[in-house]
Amino acid sequence: MNKLVIGILAHVDAGKTTLSESILYTSGKIGKLGRVDNKDAYLDTYELEKARGITIFSKQALLEIGETQITLLDTPGHVDFSAEMERTLQVLDYAILVISGADGVQGHTKTLWRLLDKYQIPVFLFVNKMDQNGTDKDKLIMELKKQLEDGCIEFGQDKTEEFYDQIAMCDETMMEYYLENGFLEEKQIKQAVKERKVFPCFFGSALKLDGIEEFLNGFLTYTIPPCYQEEFGAKVFKITRDDQGNRLTHMKLTGGKLKVKDTLTNGLWEEKVNQIRVYSGQKYEAVSELEAGSVCTVTGLSQTKPGEGLGIERISDTPLLEPVLFYQIILPQGCDPRMMLPKLRQIEEEEPELHIVWDEQLQEIQAQIMGEVQIEILQSMIQERFGVEVSFDAGRIVYKETIDNVVEGVGHFEPLRHYAEVHLLLEPGEPGSGLEFGIDCSEDDLGKSWQRLIVTHLEEKAHRGVLTGSAITDMKITLISGRAHNKHTEGGDFREATYRAVRQGLKEAKSILLEPYYTFQLELPEKMVGRAMTDIEKMYGTCEISQTNGDIAILSGSAPVITMRNYQKEVIAYTKGHGKLFCSLKGYFPCHNTEEVIESIGYDSERDIENPTGSVFCAHGAGFLVDWDEVKNYMHVEGYRKKNEDSSVKVPDSKVSYTEERLISVDEIDQIINSTFYSNQGKKSAWKRNKTARESYYEPTTYVTKPKENKEEYLLVDGYNIIYAWPELKEHAEENMDGARMKLLETLSNYQGIRRCQIIVVFDAYRVEGHQEEVIDYHNIHLVYTREAQTADQYIEKFAHDNQRKYNITVATSDGLQQIIIRGAGCSLLSARDLKDEINRANEKMKQEFLETQGRDRNYLLDSLSQDIKQKMEELMKEEDHI
């Protein structure tokens, strides 16, 4: 038996569900014609669908007409549920587009047409409601040709010369055949429909069953059942749960067969099928085996996702329609958000476009949503499933970013015993094209496996722009060069280098902020057109009068979502209920108020620790950071594009202004000690001030008499004191203390590699009940968490007192009282500001040495040898000369 999977699509209220009922009734699948008004439609089974009279979730019905088995998928018509509809398109063989004869081609109809073109789905058109007064078939055909495609041809007419002539105009081959023979073969017309050159149009009234039988006959006549491969393949298009809570995976078999207990995989996981169900309406039949071309629902799979390909089937592209608003989900008093989050993830599995996220900074759950109707549905689902009554805030716009010029982004990741370098070419793409990734890199420079890994890292993450931190889009990113190390490179190194290359390129490029736009149709009394056009102009939109019908005018145009999102209520108010506004998402275009949005969001790309813009290099066994605007001077691989000396992107040197309050100077501390602790010893025994770290240890010292004893150097750092004294760490600590702590440790770890002294970082854990003193080796430094009832000050003071004769000890803190105690113990001091200055100087010195080395034309072995080894080599060479 031939198998076809067809979907019914329409603008809301065009009569899509009524047409579905009529097809089921005419085919004999149901004995009674259900109606949306009576809340007994065969496919509207959800209570909210019955209550609101709209289709919310796609559902299927199975019917047989002659030798053809048809799986009919009814999709949502409301724009708020466009994502549900788009997921269903991925499994269709043919589509039926329903158009209201009374309203013609509406705004969402054009969106559907673009989607059908994107997925290359052959389309049959059914113009409904032709029983209403004022409908004109000839005018509607002309509108379809103008608004949609010239290939829209009425198929209800007899096979006349005019009929063949219209079809022949759609294809040169058919035109030649028609001119030679005077008619066209049926198989030629079928193929033209399959190739989307011809779009058969039928007219009628689904409510009165007028034209339904003729439409079904025409549909079966001019469709070609697809052929499938013998190897197993399946496309997942939906995830739901049944009344018992079982997870259901809806899929279409695109190859081979599927049996109960078969093991399915996408290459990352393997799971067994427990049950195969074939749904029709609310009921289903459990089967043991199915062939390709069937749509089924299986249980037992816990990791499937909509759009996923199984077996030979590949994963689908990212959906074109996506929510443009994000809202905070407000939980009732006493409801723990971390307990609620996993439950919301279940709904996200069914509606992936929701993008449920926990914002750590704002301490709130957020979701991306299409509109107010979807909010009502979500509230109902959460209440029904989990017994929790949630609400939503006013919502905010989902912005995106792209670039306006071609740049080369570079990233390098080389801490000790790690290595990866990546060069990417970032190019602007066409509006609406999304992200495209490619490779144009020689395998002589970088192995094929590394190249594939880099592209995987490009695809695995939603990369953030540098203007507002919004996701980037409409770009092509091509891998053009890179380098790995035979010994030290690991997979994670290329992840870091790839992310940094994207961000560095974005910082160098001219970025553009994008916002979502609606395309709209506004029907209103003709006398109110002036008011409407003024409103739209104020909303930074554009429009024109597309047609007039008596006293009613229709305005068509586009406007930013943020300015038009609440305009529907205003239209109803000033037209006293006679106006109608139909909106559908047009896409993302340059923002109308970029500066205002950037300022309100307040995103700082260089303080986003999760998405760094600079790179990490290594010299003398220690890593150091290089800012994005200097990083190309340090790269190991020659740049793909020559650096433009006259680049318009000029970035001033970034200098951190510290507002640290230095409570007391070292000289003042010495004066206090001399005038208190040693005040009664007279001038002969006055305490002599210990030299500062800079004087004693961090700069060469000239000794006149007895040389100083060579003691091991120790630097003790009061961890939390430094974190709250460095502005960039303090700001980060307010959002994420763990992140600030790790940032400090990484900085000190790099510093140790340069200074080669022992570094101990001390953190308070005195409030942790029962905590024992904990010493941890973090790379090349030591990390101490104090025991219960012991502060970091106490630990440092005790260490200084016990070891000041044994080691040269310097303490980094800005605590005034602790400074006095430490100086009294005979140790040197660094304030938080001094420590930062020391680290910056050490890094700058390392960079200069590295640049000097990089500036040489060639690298010589002798450059890396010590003076002793060079001298020995010279002596050996002299001995050989004598021989």
Image (cartoon, grey):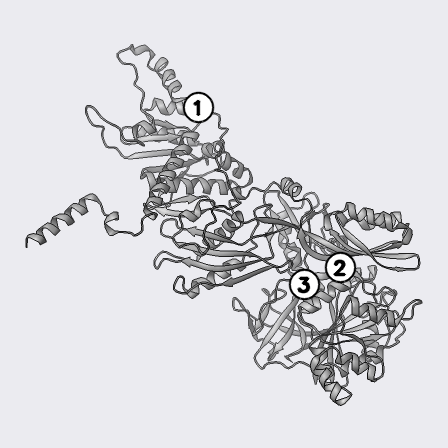
Name, please, the residue furthest toward the bottom: 181
Q: Which mark is residue 79?
A: 2
Q: Position of residue 714 (x, y in %)?
A: 32, 34
Q: Residue at x 48, y 56 (%)?
A: 424
Cα distance, mark 1 to mark 3?
Answer: 62 Å
| Sequence order check, earlier mark of 2 and 3 | 2
Residue type (three-letter) at the residue carrying disc 2? Val
Q: Secondary structure at mark 3?
A: loop
Cα distance, mark 2 to mark 3?
Answer: 28 Å
Q: Compared with residue 416, is residue 309 higher up or lower down, i.e. above or below? A: below
Q: Residue at x 80, y 62 (%)?
A: 106
- Mark 3 lies on residue: 245
Residue type (three-letter) at the residue carrying disc 3? Gly
Q: Compared with residue 674, is residue 617 higher up or lower down, i.e. above or below? A: below
Q: Position of residue 168 (x, y in %)?
A: 75, 81
Badge 2: few (under 14), some or many (20 or more) residues near its Cα, within 10 Å?
A: many
Task: Please indicate whether residue 264 sits to the left or right of residue 205 in the image.
Answer: left
Name, please, the residue furthest toward the left: 883
Q: Which mark is residue 816?
A: 1
Which is in the foreground here, disc 1 or disc 3? Answer: 1
Cβ atoms at labels 2 and 1 below 8 Å apart: no
Q: Secondary structure at mark 2?
A: helix
Badge 3: few (under 14), some or many (20 or more) residues near its Cα, within 10 Å?
A: few
